[in-house]
Image (cartoon, rainbow, N blue to C red):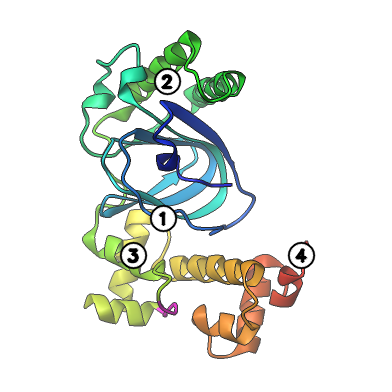
Amino acid sequence: MFRNPHTSVARPFVIRRLDTAEYKLNRQIPASVSKSDCFLYLYDGEVLTDVGAEPFLVCSGQFLYIPEGIPFAIKYYNGSKGYMGAFSRPMLRNPNIGLLYRREPVLADVPEEERGFVSSLSEKLLREQDEGGGETVSVILQAVLDLLLAQIDAFAGDGRAKLGSTLCTGFLDMVFDRSSAISGVSAYAGRLGVSANHLNRTVKGATGRSAGEWVDISRIALSKLLLRQSDMPIIDIAIRSGFEDQSYFSRFFKKHTGLTPSQFRSGEE
């Protein structure tokens, strides 16, 4: 459902709709490097991405542009609604849009009064792609894409990353690292050589959430993934998610989802 547009570089243009109802880490997209320029626009929810060596938190009303050649991966989705796509520059009718001269990722805030227009342009691109069978690029598609990129260029400003703190970057990389069990804030702070309070303040300032909240998000996302896509015993899932006590894990999971782990695994809503 959430394939990386980088995998479609043989096509000059691709766009897909994003629509996730909850925290999701469903077949997490691996980092890859593309010969295409990529983009992500959200009109609701949020997506945490890795672009190059930095995490970008893309929120409602934001457009992320990723120039060709920069590794791009997605860490998690949360109620994400919007569009994700990629294009090759030779297909553009206007190659002189300022955005295309950026050599770093650009995160642009779309003004509230312009979000409907950006969404309608994205939807028009999706329709044109589908009508062409995904194999041809129509003149209309080219014109709409040029207009979309020109609009984003006007909104971009300096387009700097929202998560510029090295400490915050290191923390998010650790907390979403699926090669080891999730730890508590104090453990991550120790590895980073700071106090838990300092880590919480820094992460809160950069993302709007404390380090503890990000740990909880990661725990819920991982436990949902393992419950639905593996036969791993619940006690083992609890341990992987950072809980030594299965009963406490079950209470934590129900508090955040309204369901016990067993109910979630069985598909109850």
Residue pointed to by mark 4: 267
Residue pointed to by mark 2: 148
Give the vertical position of 161 relative to 188 (above or below).
above
N-term-proximal mark, 2 vs 1: 1
Say which of marks 2 and 4 sits in front: 4
N-term-proximal mark, 2 vs 4: 2
Amino acid at the residue labelled 3:
Asp
Image quarter hosting the C terminus: bottom right
Distance from disc 4 to disc 1, alpha carbons, whole Å, reads: 26 Å
Q: Which mark is residue 173?
A: 3
Amino acid at the residue labelled 2:
Leu
Residue pointed to by mark 1: 30
Say which of marks 3 and 1 sits in front: 1
N-term-proximal mark, 3 vs 1: 1
Mark 4–mark 1 CB contact (< 8 Å): no
Secondary structure under tag 4 reads loop
Relative placement, left or right, of 36 versus 114 is: left
